[in-house]
Amino acid sequence: MKKNNEYYEKLKDPRWQKVRLQVFERDEWACVVCGNKTKPLNVHHVAYFQGMEPWEVPRGFLVTLCESCHKKPDNAFRLRRDISNVLDMMWKIRGGFVSVRTALKRKLQDESKKS
């Protein structure tokens, strides 16, 4: 429990708050899963890096999720599970490198169209 409390305290740090706002702005203040712009938003870490503070994680591994999508365990699991597929996709889209966020957003949009 102590470790969890320490993490949540770090999310109050001004450095994290600045990164959080940058991610929201980059994602156009919309959930990358469902596209909602009216629900409360969260920044989701697609991957965690040992020894890095939350604000030190490369921005490409941070995505905007609405509160509903962030709470769904299958969304978080799918985001983590798909990271290897997304990394592969990064090299295939437009014949070169794109950000994890861009590749992930495209993958999630394709999946939601199929549903």
Image (cartoon, rainbow, N blue to C red):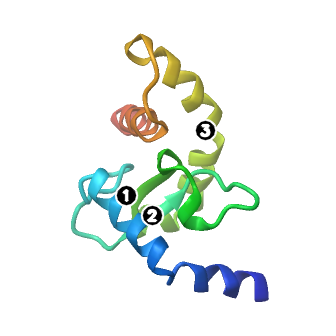
Residue 102 versus residue 51: which sits nearer the camera? Answer: 51
Q: Residue at x 39, y 36 (%)?
A: 102
- x, y percentage for residue 81? 65, 42
The answer to whether mark 2 and mark 1 are in CB contact below 8 A is: yes
Q: Quadrant of residue 69?
A: bottom left
In space, the residues marked 2 and 1 are separated at their CA atoms by 7 Å
Q: Quadrant of residue 108?
A: top left
Identify the amino acid type marked 1: Val
Few, some or many C-alpha atoms within 10 Å of disc 3 (few <14, some 14-19, many ≥20)? some
Identify the amino acid type marked 3: Ile
In space, the residues marked 3 and 2 are separated at their CA atoms by 16 Å
Task: Judge whether 31 appears above or below 7 on screen.
Answer: above
Q: Earlier in the sequence, mark 1 or mark 3?
A: 1
Task: Judge whether 59 appears above or below 55 on screen.
Answer: above
**Side of 63 where 85 appears, left or right:** right
In the rendered image, which residue does mark 1 sit on? 23
**Side of 32 where 92 appears, left or right:** right
Residue 1 visible to the viewer: no
In space, the residues marked 1 and 3 are separated at their CA atoms by 18 Å
Few, some or many C-alpha atoms within 10 Å of disc 1 (few <14, some 14-19, many ≥20)? many
Residue 87 visible to the viewer: yes
- x, y percentage for residue 47? 63, 51
Q: Residue at x 42, y 18 (%)?
A: 93
- x, y percentage for residue 100? 49, 37
In the rendered image, which residue does mark 2 sit on? 43
Q: Which element carries disc 3, helix, strand or loop?
A: helix
Q: Which element carries disc 1, helix, strand or loop?
A: helix
Q: Earlier in the sequence, mark 3 or mark 2?
A: 2
In the rendered image, which residue does mark 3 sit on? 83
Residue 26 versus residue 44: which sits nearer the camera? Answer: 26
Q: Which mark is residue 104?
A: none
